[in-house]
Image (tube, coloured by chain):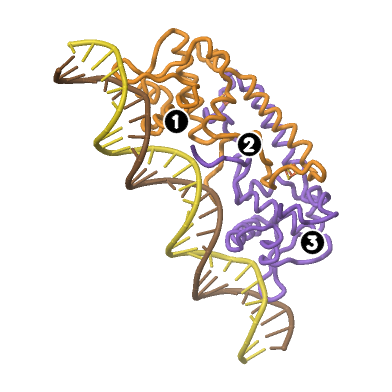
Chain colours: A purple, B orange, C brown, D yellow
Amino acid sequence: MYQIHNDMFSKACEYGIKASTYIALQSLQDKRVSLKEIAEEINSPVAFTAKILHQLAKNNILDSVKGPAGGFQIEKENVEKLKLSHVVFAIDGDSIYSGCGLGLEKCNEQQPCPLHDKFVIIRNELKQMLEETSLLDLTSGLDLGITFLKR
Amino acid sequence: MYQIHNDMFSKACEYGIKASTYIALQSLQDKRVSLKEIAEEINSPVAFTAKILHQLAKNNILDSVKGPAGGFQIEKENVEKLKLSHVVFAIDGDSIYSGCGLGLEKCNEQQPCPLHDKFVIIRNELKQMLEETSLLDLTSGLDLGITFLKR
DNA sequence: TTTAATTCGGATAAGTTTGTCCGAATTAAA
DNA sequence: TTTAATTCGGACAAACTTATCCGAATTAAA
Ligand code: SF4
Ligand code: SF4
């Protein structure tokens, strides 16, 4: 009927996560990376990615430097402190935390539907995953070849 | 940045689930219900709901009857057999089953990212929930008052 | 047989997300 | 100081989802 609705996150969020991961990896080697390089590396549209990076910079997830040799960077000590949840929140808001997976409006704990218990478990696991996974964690699988961000 | 991306399912799917649940409830009492009644009951746009019901009928999830006193119905014996997964699949396709929650394309079991194991667990739980929950299960919470579909 | 209630189904509009364009602002280097 | 590389940021366009409109087809009942 409609296009397959495939992702847990918005496209913007997906690019944000990939970009942050790549920037984190380069920052660990004290390399600052440009928008152009990032977009190429994660295979995303340049101008759209610019907006997302800007958004992340405004939310203090990335540091940005203008001018020649400028670009984006993450303070080394923050690579471990920054969690996936921070990136997701900066772009998609608190979608993961609020509302009902079935779209039946807010939870009514007094009279929950038969799915409620299972739903809450799943949502909490997702939440936990986002809050426990740091950008450092995400880079760790990329050591062999960064190409996986492009797949 | 953008509107909060709140649901696990598309709006179409959400209406589909609510409508199916209401139709199931009425079918158990041998009542056939019209589009108008359904849309009113689940608080959804009439014409849009029509398309979704039509889609569900084409996929043999609902029986539809045209003409006066026509409407939608589910064979009693199917109310228990039909799972949430069938409704979701008919409308949103196999989104839940395929692809990666992070949007990093298909799983590569040989070289998964650090999230992979947790992600697969969450996805499987979601899958299981959809496949285990029948329309009958969904109606069971509604006995007291159907109003919860409207919230 | 006529009428009216209803689903079917295409055209189209509105809203949201995704993506593009381009000029302004900033700043390192020539 | 000039130049050029780069992010910033608004306006706009394309694509997708959601929603509306309206007429055709069907069919029960008058
Ligand atoms: S009770 Fe059911 S419908 Fe309501 S929020 Fe919980 S899972 Fe969603
Ligand atoms: S390995 Fe990671 S990125 Fe790839 S599909 Fe699994 S969870 Fe997604």
Residue B80's disc number: none
Q: Is mark 1 within 8 Å of ligand 1?
A: no
Q: CA distance from mark 2 to mark 1?
A: 28 Å
Say the numbered circle drawn on residue A97.
2
Percent x, y of residue B41: 41, 22
Looking at the picture, does residue A73 appear above or below residue C16?
below
Task: Give the number of the mark in front: 3 or 1.
Answer: 1
Looking at the rendered structure, the secondary structure element under dot 1 is: helix
| B61 sits to left or right of D27 | right
Query: In the image shown, does A37 or B88 lie closer to the viewer?
Result: B88
Mark 3 belongs to which amino acid? Ser
**Badge 1: few (under 14), some or many (20 or more) residues near its Cα, within 10 Å?**
many
Q: Give coordinates of residue B90: x percent, y percent.
A: 53, 29
Mark 3–mark 2 Cα distance, whole angstroms, equals 30 Å
Mark 3 lies on residue: A27
Q: Within 10 angstroms of label 2, few (less than 14), some, or many (20 or more) residues?
A: few
- Tell me: B15 left or right of A95: left
Q: Are marks 3 and 2 on the same chain?
A: yes
- Which residue does the image show at 46% across and 23% down from the upper left? B19
Identify the residue under disc 1: B52
